[in-house]
Image: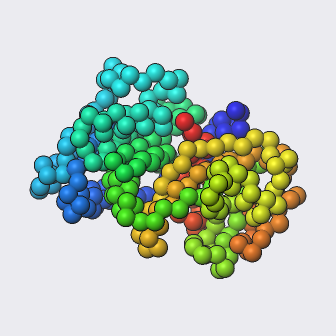
Amino acid sequence: MPYPILVMLEKNIPYSPYFGNFEKRAQELVGLLHYKKLKIAFVECSVGGFLSYNIVKRKGASKIFIGSIVPYSYDMKNYFDFNSPKGAVSEEFVDVCAEKFISISGADVVVCESSILGPDGGTPQKPVGLSFVSVRSKKGKTSFVNVFRGDRKRIMENIAAFCFSAAKNHIIGWDLETKEVSSTFVYYNGRILVMKRSRKVGTYKGMWGVASGHIEKGETSLQTAFKELEEETSMKKEFIKEMIQGSPFEFVDPKIRIRWVIHPFLAISAISPVEFVKIDWEHTSFKLIRPSELNKLRTAPMIYEGYLKTVFRG
């Protein structure tokens, strides 16, 4: 499928935001694990024990930490019997590792990361800073992809902050209502369509977003994606050259007590959206931007993640 590759060759991708100080995020996670009386384990494919160190250096770590495995070399990664052309830095690999380790470790939660720290080792298809994270628990699973900026040390710290935050939010999500949505980017000639959410919508008013909507009972995520595209942008199926689907991921919003499960799509348009877009009451305006410009906008939460999930899928 040439379209995502072209996006990457142009270096036209959004970077992941800063997730805060990794020390603070570790302390928050440790506190939650103690409060919930849960135990965690890690699979650290790239950061070499950095996650574990930032847990075990804290008082009482033995009550919440099972242990970790550090399959840094390719020989060690073979422990997971993984054989795929997508390689060890992939969503598929971290999912396999997390699933296997939770089954043998006895942990309540397992976090697995596999990343490219740099300064070497990156390619146009897998740039330096690319990081896949999988979170598995006895109550659910989710996975993420990020592209972090910075030198090797900075990227490692960002990965740690994200892993600790993702684990904490996953646990918080156990007690929240879950709602599933489809979220679709319209891509045309190196640009994507973004729309500003109106004050009439229920959540994230005034923020920039994409065509999205709740997956109704009896609908598939793909059916919802097509429906919302037509309702919110007037885009018809015949305008779409290709529909690319990324794997779902979660976003936990404790303020409104909802755990969103987001199913991301990328609709490659045959014609410019300017020719067909007619926004409905949910939005006040629209524009075409380069994906990298998402970093400059005040967007609905985790919008960047949906785009990266479709580009670096699988």
Answer left or right for 109 relative to 216: left
Q: Position of residue 295 (x, y in %)?
A: 57, 59
Q: Which quadrant of the rendered structure holds the C terminus?
A: top right
Answer left or right for 115 relative to 225: left
Q: Position of residue 163 (x, y in %)?
A: 36, 50
Would you say residue 55 is visible in this rendering?
A: no
> Eyeballing the image, is 61 above or below 213?
above
Q: Which quadrant of the rendered structure holds the N terminus?
A: top right
Residue sitting at the far bottom: 199
Answer left or right for 145 relative to 65: right
> Eyeballing the image, is 50 above or below 291?
above
Q: Position of residue 17 (x, y in %)?
A: 48, 57
> Eyeballing the image, is 76 above or below 89?
above
Residue sitting at the far front: 218
The residue lying at 80 percent from left, 46 percent from top is: 240
The residue lying at 65 percent from left, 54 percent from top is: 218
Q: Position of residue 235 (x, y in %)?
A: 81, 56
> Eyeballing the image, is 3 above or below 254?
above
